[in-house]
Each structure stands twice: as C-alpha cells, then as structure tokens.
Image: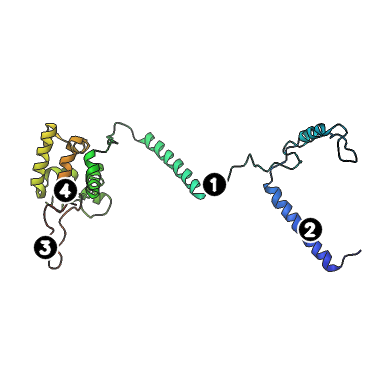
Amino acid sequence: MPLCASNRQHRGYLVRARDILHKATSAVRPTLKTGPATVLPHHGRDGLSRYGPSRARTGLQKSCPDGMDGRPDRTMENTAPPRSLANLKREISEKKWSEAQEWVKERVKGRKYRMSKRTSKEVERAPKLLAGRFHQIRTGHCRTGQYLEWTRNADTAECGWCKYRVQTREHLLKHCGRWKMQQKILWAEVRKETGKGKNRHKIRDLLADERCTRAVLDFLQTTRVGVRTGPRGPRSGQGQDEEGGEGRK
C-alpha cells in the first residue's frame, strides 16, 4: 500500500533520528572485542541444539567474549569513573604543592632554622588572642615596623613608641624605651630559667625555648607589642592610648 506524503516525511524523520542516535551512542560505546570466528552448533526447528545446550552455550561464549548475548560489555572497565570538580581541584592543588616543594629544595640550601612542631602547653592554655600574638612574633609575621614596611602596609619602619629608626622584634623585646619595666621583668625570668641574660640570647632562640614561653606570654600580656606599632592617635575628647595592661584579654 503506497504511503502518503505526510507518512513518508514522518518516516524520513524517524530514519534521521535513528541515525543520529546511533552515531551518538557509538561514540561512547566500547568497541566490541572480536575473536576468531566460531561456527555455532546447528539448531533444529524446535530451537534446541542437536549437540546439546551445553555445546551451544560454549560456542556462543567463544564467539561473543564480551557478553553472553553478543552485545558489548557495558561495564566500561577501561574508562575512568566520573569525578567531581572538587576532586579535580584537590588533585591539581596537590600537584602544584609538590612541584613548589621541589622548586624550593633545589634553590634553598644550607642549614636553616626550623621551628619546633610541638606546641607548648603554656601556649595551649593561653587565651586565643594572646596565643595568636605569640605565634605571630615567633614566626616574624607580626605587627612590627620592619614587617609592615616590607609588606607595604606602612611608609616607614620607625618605632612608633620611641621613634627608633627600625622597629624589630629584638628592639621591642630588648631596647624599646616604652617597655623598659616589662623588659626588665622578662629578662629576669629568662635568666632564672636558663641562666643566660639579655645579651647572650638571640630572639629566635628565646622564642623557641619552651622554658621562656611563660615569660614571653606575660610580657605580651602586659604590653601592646604585636597589637600595634605605636600609640593610637588622639580622638575627640580623648588623649593618647593608655599604657600597659591593655594587652590583657
């Protein structure tokens, strides 16, 4: 029976859709592994093999290694499973850090000071803000004129307390005239614990020695070291920043 124009057009659309779907699925479908040609046992009219069902099944398995029914295996064994964007970003970050560490090892040589990975119990028991100031001063990334000028957060490295030309950790803990009384108490405790005075101690050794941790915490608690580099400017109806004791949290 001849087809009318609308039916022929509809059939043409179906054929085109089938071809497009076939191309799309064949692009992601795994290739069928073809083995040597194997002749299956002859089947009778009743659908059973003349040589028995076991031999027929064996022949089918040999000719279709990917599946019992001759269709390709859908397990996608050779294809990586889908991964999330967060997992990919994590892998990229890990590779970048490993490359950065190798780059540093190639260019940084000689003996370097390494801070102990252990955290002092005195610091663990201290208030959070005070412990944060201690770790900042210990690593050198703290509010000193030298560091703020280096990070371009200040125009000068001058000490805001005594107007010395460069404000460093050593200056604040040893020589700054604004904290003379607190420095005297600090170094008296350090001499009592270690037997060495101010002139025989480097700041990095002082901050790394657990015996001196309590004395340094007391010094920070009674001063404004690590909070700002100088006195706060005058406000309306108020004078300069009060001295001592403000560091207590």
Between the residue at mark 2 and the residue at mark 1, the CA separation in whole angstroms equals 36 Å
**Circle 4/circle 2 CB separation < 8 Å:** no
N-terminal-most mark, 4 or 2: 2
Q: Secondary structure at mark 4?
A: helix
Position of residue 136 in the picture relative to residue 94 (left or right): left
Residue tagged 1: 83
Type of amino acid at the residue the image marks with label 4: Gln
Occupied quadrant, residue 72: top right
Between the residue at mark 1 and the residue at mark 3, the CA separation in whole angstroms equals 61 Å
Q: Secondary structure at mark 3?
A: loop
> Does residue 171 appear anywhere in the picture?
no
Please provide percent x and percent y for residue 109. 33, 32
Please provide percent x and percent y for residue 126. 22, 45
Residue occupying the point 57% across, 46% down: 82
Between the residue at mark 4 and the residue at mark 3, the CA separation in whole angstroms equals 22 Å
N-terminal-most mark, 2 or 1: 2
Q: Is residue 224 above or below residue 49?
A: below
Label 2 CA crowd tier, 10 Å (few <14, some 14–19, many 20+): few
Please state, as top left, top right, bottom left or bottom right, where the N terminus lies in the image.
Answer: bottom right
Residue tagged 2: 15
Type of amino acid at the residue the image marks with label 2: Val
N-terminal-most mark, 3 or 2: 2
Type of amino acid at the residue the image marks with label 1: Arg
Label drawn at residue 210: none
Label drawn at residue 221: 4
Between the residue at mark 4 and the residue at mark 2, the CA separation in whole angstroms equals 83 Å
N-terminal-most mark, 1 or 4: 1
Q: Nearer the viewer, residue 107 or 54?
A: 54
